[in-house]
Image (cartoon, rainbow, N blue to C red):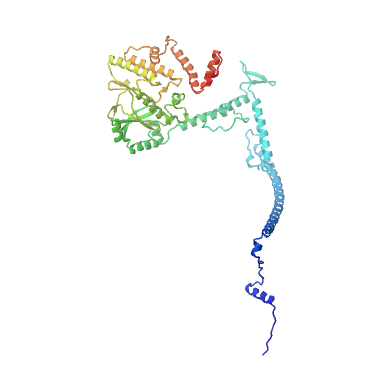
Amino acid sequence: LRFTFIYISEEAYHNISVMQRNPWGISERKEPLCSFAEIMDEEVARKLQLEEQSSSDMKAADAVEAELCERDDCIDDYTIAKLLQKDYDLEVEHTLRLKEKQYNKDDKVGISLDLLKPSREKYDSDESVEERDDEELEYVNNKLDCYTIPEFGSKGVVFQNGRCVTKHDKEICGRKNVSKFMQFPAEFNTGDAAKIDLKLSNRVFNQLKVHSINMAKRRHRVHENKEKATAELAVDTTTRMILFKMINGNLLESVDGQVATGKESVVFHAVGGSDLIQERQCSNFAVKVFKTTLNEFQNRIDYVQEDFRFKNTRKILKLWAEKEYRNLKRLKSNGLPCPDPVTVQSHVLVMSFIGDEKVSAPKLKDVQLDLVTWEVLYDELKSIMKSMFRNCRLVHADLSEFNILYWNEKLWIIDVAQATDLSNPQCFSYLARDCRNVNNFFAERGVRVCSVRELFNEVTDLKFTDDCTFNAEVEDLVNSSRPKVYGKRCPADCLLDSQNDQGASVSERDFAP
């Protein structure tokens, strides 16, 4: 037997053991061990922090340098591609321009291929595009501001820049048509033609005007059954939901058939709920539904535009029922005979029913009475008008035999939705019309009535003396009441104007709150 002995140093033995643990033969680096004192040493900690910071700064600098190198290469490639694309687009534009000339030739109406042409804005910077647009807009604005329509004499001819210009000039008529075109209804899409050099011929303007009128007619035309129900019976989907909620809330027990109809509303008979019957001591009620269309009653705004309680004209349709509700409340609080309002929801008004069961009280125009009774009713109606004006500060504005009921030998005032407050300057003209309607009706029944001027003076306590100039004096009264309404909105300006008219000096105490 032969035995061979190999001497291995301690370091080699350590490397062999490491290779056995690591199959790749890579020795693992071990961090040098530090004592606890070195770890707690502040100088060692500061040194390590500086080394880490310097290494991170070097890595960031290398990343920025690499990014800049890549960006420069991209910019060069993008510029070359942009120049090549620009040359190609110029060739396309030239080709399309030749095709336009070939298609159009000498025709008055030509075919434009501008939509097929590439956009030139992508080759310009944003600043140059904005500057060019501002310059073009400023040029057009200056041109329009400097343009003035010449003043024509009685002959309709004027000489301008050495040529004869008539009022039928093509350019002048085109600009006038554009100004009229911009006054079309808001529903008609006219576009922004205020600051561009646009001219419309008479033929084009007339066609647009006819088209606008036809659009308005089609918009108000009734097509479907639900729209027809809204226009005729005022019972659309929204109205039915409101009535269902009233029934479910035990406000009403049922809604019966139609009682009356008018140009702005429809009245139905309803049976009140148990709580409402116990509160009002009656079971019959009237449900007034205001129509949501304006096909029949288009001048509604005239009755509320100057009323300080209803200034938002965008909600006139919804506020019309609320306006009658408040007017009825005001009449009822002053003891005048009228329906007692219960509640109002949107355009649906619930009030007491004037009549017997489901039969409403007759209107004054359908009543047959003797002369003595007519004379008594005439005096009663005059006292009602006087109380409405002086106590309630209201004018009915539509008082006639159609809006007065006769029940239990007395008159009942209904349909006060259009009644206006005295703050409305038109209230005096409405009152004069009411006086005229009342006198005409009772005069037909054989009653010896007073003049319209005398009835107007009795109601308003004014002193008009001449019947011939009565209408003119009422018109002057309406015009003189307009500054008073303005004075309520701007009291300081109104006071200053009055002082200036009198030629007096305005002191500081006059403006004191």
Is 70 displayed left or right of 204 in the figure? Answer: right
Place residue 1 in its image quadrant.
Answer: bottom right
Question: Residue 422: in sight, yes or no?
Answer: yes
Q: Nearer the viewer, residue 35 or 54?
A: 35
User: In the figure, 429 relative to 297: above or below?
Assistant: above
Question: Residue 225: in sight, yes or no?
Answer: no
User: In the figure, 392 relative to 350: above or below?
Assistant: above
Q: Nearer the viewer, residue 40 or 361?
A: 40
Q: Nearer the viewer, residue 403 or 168?
A: 403
Is 436 displayed left or right of 72 in the figure? Answer: left
Figure label count: 0
Is 495 displayed left or right of 76 in the figure? Answer: left
Place residue 459 in its image quadrant.
Answer: top left
Residue 504 lies, in percent from the top left, at 55, 13
The residue most toward the front is: 37
Residue 137 lies, in percent from the top left, at 65, 32
Instruction: Name the residue rendered at 37%, 36% in the picture.
Output: 242
Instruction: Name the residue rendered at 66%, 28% in the picture.
Output: 142
Is 432 displayed left or right of 36 in the figure? Answer: left
Residue 494 lies, in percent from the top left, at 52, 19
The residue most toward the bottom is: 1
Instruction: Name the residue rendered at 68%, 33% in the picture.
Output: 135
Residue 154 lies, in percent from the top left, at 61, 15
